[in-house]
Image: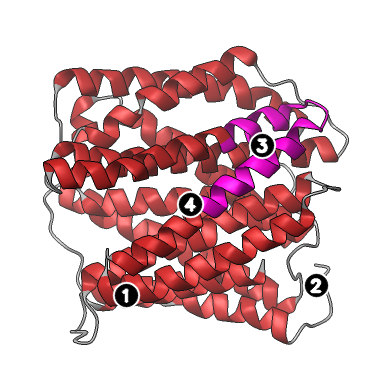
Amino acid sequence: MGSAIFFFWLAAIFGTLMRYYFVNEVPFLEYKHLLHAHSHVALLGWAYPLVSGALLFLLLQHSQWLTKYRYLLGLNVVSAVGMAIFFLYQGYGLYSISFSAVHLLSAYAFAYYFLKDLAALSPRAHTRFVRWGIYWLLVSTLGLWAIGPVSALLGKLHPLYFASIQFFLHFQFNGWLTYAIVGLWLFHIERSGKSVAVSTTGFWLLQASLLLTYALSVTWSTPLSMVFYLNTLGVLLQVVAFCLILRPVFIAANPFKRLDDWTDILFSFGVLCLLLKVTVQTAVALPAVAEISYTIRNYVIGFIHLITLGAITLTAVSLLLKSGLLPRNTSARAGWLLLLAAFILSELILFGQGTLLWLRQGFVAYYYEILFGVTALFPISLTIILLSYIRPKPPDTS
């Protein structure tokens, strides 16, 4: 997991440089290349190995494929290094796409072996979510395969080109990563000796909502009334689904009830971000709000970070910390809590400024300088976390 945190640190460096672009000139880097490097390293170099590693190390006590998993995770490290270098150098080009393809093939192999291992486990509430998370991971890649033919035949300005990209991102964020995180949450509860009966109706409503809410991803390029209505139906189904699914979960183990340890704080914020994700998506049931959600860039970036840094990172990291799979010492504690503070501040700034733009109130004074300063806290906090690997200190028991 240390290599994944390194790529998180690298993605944070790239993100901080992107913020600096709006403060001062950066003549030696092209912004669009930096953006591609940041997004690919963050999603494929950090989020993917974080979640797949958590599933592997937490759920599978024994596997005949351990050697293969090590090779595949190593292959993902190679692909992430290649993407970091060549997306910076050339943006979308032969080498960067080649390393992306390496990641894609390693993810396919991981899915194959993991599903075989998962089939050997006793069916539980968490296994259904995890299994479907892997299925949606595979489905999401259809969008990537479509990008090449669509761009060659119709061009990169065609709505289908953007729809293909959004297909990948939608089923990554709302399918693969969300389902896996809910599965890990359920596993954490079951491991503590409590049983949770997940509503079958709620689960299949969630499946239907996932398909329907893809409509929002294409409304900005295809703003048809029917597309808005499909999204409205999808988000309404989603809120009903999560109410049915999470009610027994909160009855069994309310994550906000006991905060005895600093890892509990991380976990509770991760769960809160998952609930906020559903709440924000419910708000876009109104077509007018849906249009605002994708036309104000601050909202778009804030929402993506709410999922990746909040719901995904905080939840998965806290469970890995609780299981002793990540260093849990004084340095780690300081680093993760500083990262949490940076995340909260950045979300407040992004959504706050987005709301001011919506109200046509302009920009906060020194907005870009403030946002750059807060963003710089991410690589600083991750440097502290990485130091917990190099110079371990006595375990923090507070």
Vertical placement of residue 333 versus 159, above or below:
below
Q: Is residue 127 magenta?
A: yes
Question: Residue flagged by tag 2: what amino acid is it?
Answer: Asp
Q: Is residue 8 left or right of residue 91?
A: right
Q: Nearer the viewer, residue 384 or 65?
A: 65
Between circles 4 and 2, the one closer to the viewer is 4
Q: Which residue is mark 2?
A: 396
What is the CA distance from the residue labelled 4 to the residue labelled 3?
23 Å
Residue that numbered label 4 is attached to: 104
- Magenta residues, start to end: 105-134
Which of the two labelled residues, at mark 1 and mark 4, occupies the earlier sequence position? 1
The chief SS type of the magenta part is helix
Q: Earlier in the sequence, mark 3 or mark 1?
A: 1
The residue drawn where x is 34% and y is 17% is 233
In percent of width and height, residue 159 lies at: 16, 38
User: Viewer-nearest of labels 4 and 3?
Assistant: 4
Dot 2: element: loop
